[in-house]
Amino acid sequence: MQKLKIKFRQLRYKLKTELLTFSHLAVVILLILFVWWTSSSISALNRNWTLQQRLSERQVEKMRLEIEVETLKLEQEYLKSAEYQEYMARAKQNRMFPGETMVILPQNSQAAKDKAKEYQSETREKSNFELWLDFWFS
């Protein structure tokens, strides 16, 4: 039991004199401060990067909405124009100027539709070489 007390006192003395000195404590405190400062700097950088990304997204959204507003204003001006109103009156109400005659064509017959399909199937795509020949010699 006496030996155990002596060992304990020796260990406590070594701790006080060799490990818990001012210089060792100063190094540990500086190390803790450095780790704290580094982690807070990294978290601040991360937060700033996230905020910058959100700001960029909002700026893009703002630009898109401004373009959309401008487009809608131009469309509104066009819809108010006499040109558009005349076009719609002619298209929807079959209006015409004095002296004009309106020709209403009948729907295409089945024979005409078949002929158009036949013509489309006859045309073939030209090869690249033929396209170049047409470009240079036509």
Image: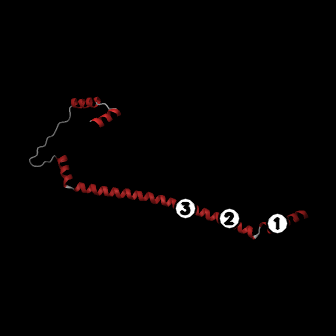
Is residue 1 in sight in this rendering?
A: no
Residue nearer the viewer, 39 or 136: 136
Marks 1 and 2, how far apart at CA: 23 Å
Q: Earlier in the sequence, mark 3 or mark 2?
A: 2
**Camera-side residue: 20 or 102?**
20
Task: Label 1, secondary structure: give it.
Answer: helix
Task: Give amino acid for label 2.
Answer: Leu
Figure quadrant of residue 25: bottom right
Q: Residue at x 58, y 63 (%)?
A: 41
Circle nearer the N terminus (3, 1): 1
* Front one among 37 and 3: 37
Q: Is residue 53 visible?
A: yes
Residue 80 quadrant: bottom left
The residue at 63%/64% (across/down) is: 36
CB of mark 3 within 8 Å of CB of mark 1? Answer: no
Could you say where residue 95 lies in the image, as x and y percent from the top left? 14, 48
Residue placed under numbered mark 1 in the picture: 14
Q: Amino acid at mark 3?
A: Leu
For this orientation, the residue located farthest to the front is 137
> Residue 16: x and y, percent?
80, 68
The label number, if any, that marks residue 84 in the structure image: none
Where residue 75 sits, quadrant-wise, is bottom left
Type of amino acid at the residue the image marks with label 1: Lys
Q: Residues within 10 Å of mark 3 (few under 14, many from 20)?
A: few
Read off the residue under disc 3: 45
Q: Name which of mark 1 and mark 2 comes first in the sequence.
A: 1
Q: Which residue is mark 2?
A: 31
**Residue 13 location (% of width, % of height):** 83, 68
Report the Cα–Cα distance between label 3 and label 1.
43 Å
Residue 78 on image: x %, y %: 24, 55
Q: Residues within 10 Å of mark 1 (few under 14, many from 20)?
A: few
Which quarter of the rendered picture does the N terminus lie within? Answer: bottom right
